[in-house]
Amino acid sequence: MTRVYTQYEILQQLGLSEADIPKFQDPEHWFDVFPAQGREDMQEFGIHTDWRRSFYTTDKNPFYDSFVRWQFTHLKANNKISYGKRFTIFSALDGQPCADHDRSKGEGVNPQEYTCIKIALVDIPEQLAEWKDKKISLVAATLRPETMYGQTNCFVLPEGEYGLFEMKDDEFFVMTERAAKNMAYQELTKED
């Protein structure tokens, strides 16, 4: 049976008290505590290491940081590396990208690429009469755009809740609020 430790027991095992917790708001404080703790733990495991050459691999060590910057500058100048896009999940709550292990649930969930197909609304329903002079499209999202050629129909869920959302170039899309929110965080590609 696996034993679950309380946070206080973990603190005690690390030789820390509850009063030490606020100190960790300063990122530099982590360097004062955990490298030494990690080294001690490794030695208890029986690892034989020459610790004389250990160093920080962050900007806390200006020599190492400068070396890494120099490497990347030269690699970029010689076209050995290039910058590109790396799609990731975005947390609207935190206002920042949310990597796989940053989430309390949904680990293993990756960004999903959809293609949106605009279907021009020819007959404007009464509910949208005030926008009749605008370009309005129903938007269908698909994982298989090659299946959309020759589309002649678009079916919507009768119980679905749809809204009219203003896009760039004075265009309006009919879609769900969730779809609009997801598109708001989507970086558009050149074809868009």
Image (spheres, helix red, strand yellow):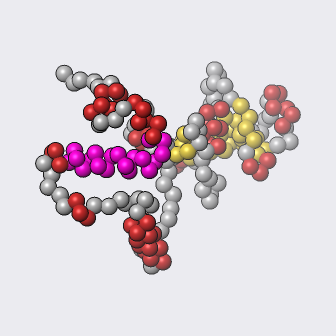
Q: Residue 151: in sight, yes or no?
A: no
Report the quarter where the N terminus lies. top left
For this rendering, which residue is in front, 18 or 139? 18
Q: On the rendered structure, is 145 left or right of 176?
A: left
Indicate the position of residue 146 as horizontal and vertical percent values: 52, 49
Q: On the rendered structure, is 153 left or right of 80?
A: right
The reply to whether the magenta stretch includes residue 33 is yes
Report the quarter where the C terminus lies. bottom right
Quarter of the image for residue 91 reads: top right
- Residue at image x 58%, y 36%? 93
- Residue at image x 32%, y 61%? 55
For this rendering, which residue is in front, 18 or 192? 18
Q: Residue 50: in sight, yes or no?
A: yes
Secondary structure, magenta segment, majority class: helix
**Which region shows up in magenta?**
24-42
Indicate the position of residue 89 as horizontal and vertical percent values: 50, 43
- Residue at image x 44%, y 41%? 24
- Residue at image x 47%, y 73%? 73
For this rendering, which residue is in front, 62 or 129? 62
Quarter of the image for residue 5 reads: top left
Eyeballing the image, is 51 above or below 96?
Answer: below
Indicate the position of residue 94 as horizontal and vertical percent values: 57, 39
Q: On the rendered structure, is 6 left or right of 74?
A: left
Number of numbered discs visible in the structure rendering: 0
The reply to whether the magenta stretch includes residue 102 is no
Eyeballing the image, is 125 above or below 63?
Answer: above
Indicate the position of residue 92 as horizontal and vertical percent values: 59, 38
Quarter of the image for residue 142 reads: top right
Residue lying at the far bottom of the rendered structure: 78
